Image (cartoon, rainbow, N blue to C red):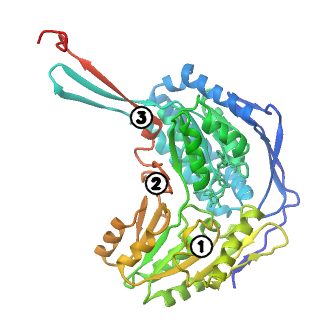
Amino acid sequence: MTVLLKPQKLVDAKVREFSMLIDGKWVEGIEAGTIERVAPGHGVTVSRYKAATKDDAVKAIAAARKAFDHGLWPRMTASERSNILLKAADMIAARADELAYLDAIEAGKPITQVQGEIAGAADIWRYAAALARDLHGESYNTLSEGTLGVVLREAVGVVSIITPWNFPFLIVSQKLPFALAAGCTAVVKPSELTSGSTLVLGEILMEAGVPAGVVNILAGTGAAVGATMTGHPDVDMVSFTGSTGIGRLTMENASKTLKKVSLELGGKNPQIVFPDADLDAFVDAAVFGAYFNAGECCNAGSRLILHRDIADDVTTRVAALSQKVKVGDPLDPSTQVGAIITPQHLEKVQGYVSAAAGSGANVALGGSHIDFGFGQYMAPTILSGVKPEMAVAREEVFGPVLSVLTFETAEDAVRIANSVDYGLSASVWSRDFDTCLTIGRKVRAGTIWMNTFMDGAAELPFGGYRQSGLGRELGRHAVEDYTETKTLNMHIGARTGWWMPR
Ligand code: NDP
């Protein structure tokens, strides 16, 4: 049986009120609607944000445009920008408890997990600060005696940053510091479900010395605010993380003015396991990969692709370890799996499980929600006997649901791994170096882990093949993503050419 940690009812929860940040001022917005966030783990209201409208988004874009075209930020030295980003990183670390609490309560995430995410985010701000000073172009002194070619990197301009609810503070930190490092200005829209920590980031950035208008932050719906941010002609680039469906819509909208687009979308990530693997290590990684962040993770290892000879044994061991996972109160430091983001999402996750069971999959563990009397929770769930063509094996379930498939040959494993529309990440488990590298080369995904799962670092690029996205975040090139390339082609000495005598 799953280990349950009943949430403490937050009867005295202090409701935090947030306004929106436009042009360096905290404002109530033009029509001042309110978004109320009910904590998914506790069932009580914990935050109220002023809901931005399309007109607020237009004002925020105008502020970012003015700050880019006429303001100080893009004209500062890289060293000055870098110092402000470092100060922001220190302030994120100083307010880590407050940020972690907000993400835990608004998203239903386990508190110790979010503490790790906030520390990781501060580290990313520091990394971006270092890259700010390393942004440079190229020069060509070898083209001809009379030619010098210089390739400049210039900030792309105004960037719209749209983020989802599953890693509210971490995902904005994978985008905004790199855009700022390049000298861009931004309008940021967090998910309407989890806007609190991003709005606190606005306070931090103002205090760290980011000039007015450089970062504007709006809570609001995707339909009103997001659509304006992706379509407005004064926006130069859109950086989006979320579902593949809305990613597609974002690209369509941005295509009307041919904006640069960066998309980090869904995944259906396989873990391929050979009989010679360290199975103890794998079983631990399987449980972590499936239930980390309640499976509400683009990188979730939601498909186990096990060699036929070990499938039954490994499934039994994964199920046994899954029962030790602690599910419940996001604010309890020993919780490993918190709440599901909304009641509607819980229904969607359960729908996938019943559809799979209806088509012949076996519910080897869990399968239903957990009723604590308030909030919404889902039991760790394992489906065995899943066929590659079932929806649960092809679509992003975004819940703590593991599908087990089997293979006979390495070619089979690669074919099954590549048979979905996604290509975000994958892992291969074997003690044989050749097996790992062969599979690693053939699986079409942006990250391949070998004998590990979901490790990451600010230095390593992250993003997807095919319908998992476009472009890469993090890594040395993250800042370059927020730049345009300009060629300076210079002639030295007397010009000879078309009309001139040679
Ligand atoms: P969405 O893709 O709907 O939302 C992501 C962000 O886009 C949110 O800020 C949202 O705003 C915004 N948005 C919504 N509509 C538009 C639009 N027309 N134009 C511009 N921006 C828009 O994800 P959901 O939160 O609804 O989650 C649905 C599913 O997406 C999940 O079940 C999961 O499968 C997948 N998902 C994948 C993520 C990933 O990291 N790959 C992250 C989150 C979800 P708002 O919601 O505030 O209206």
**In the rendered image, which residue does mark 2 sit on?**
462
The residue that disc 3 covers is 133
Amino acid type at mark 2: Phe
Of tags 2 and 1, the one toward the viewer is 1
Cα separation between marks 2 and 3: 22 Å
> Reading the chain from its start, which is encountered first: label 3 or label 1?
3
Residue 297 position in % (x across, y down): 59, 62
Residue for point 52% across, 77% down? 284
Question: Picture coordinates of residue 342 (x, y %)?
Answer: 75, 61
Q: Residue at x 53, y 66 (%)?
A: 268
Q: Nearer the viewer, residue 159 or 89?
A: 159
Image quarter of residue 338: bottom right
Residue nearest the observer in this picture, 356 or 382: 356
Q: Which residue is mark 1?
A: 392
Quarter of the image that includes the N terminus:
bottom right
> Is 496 rendered above or below residue 423?
above
The residue under label 3 is which amino acid type? Arg
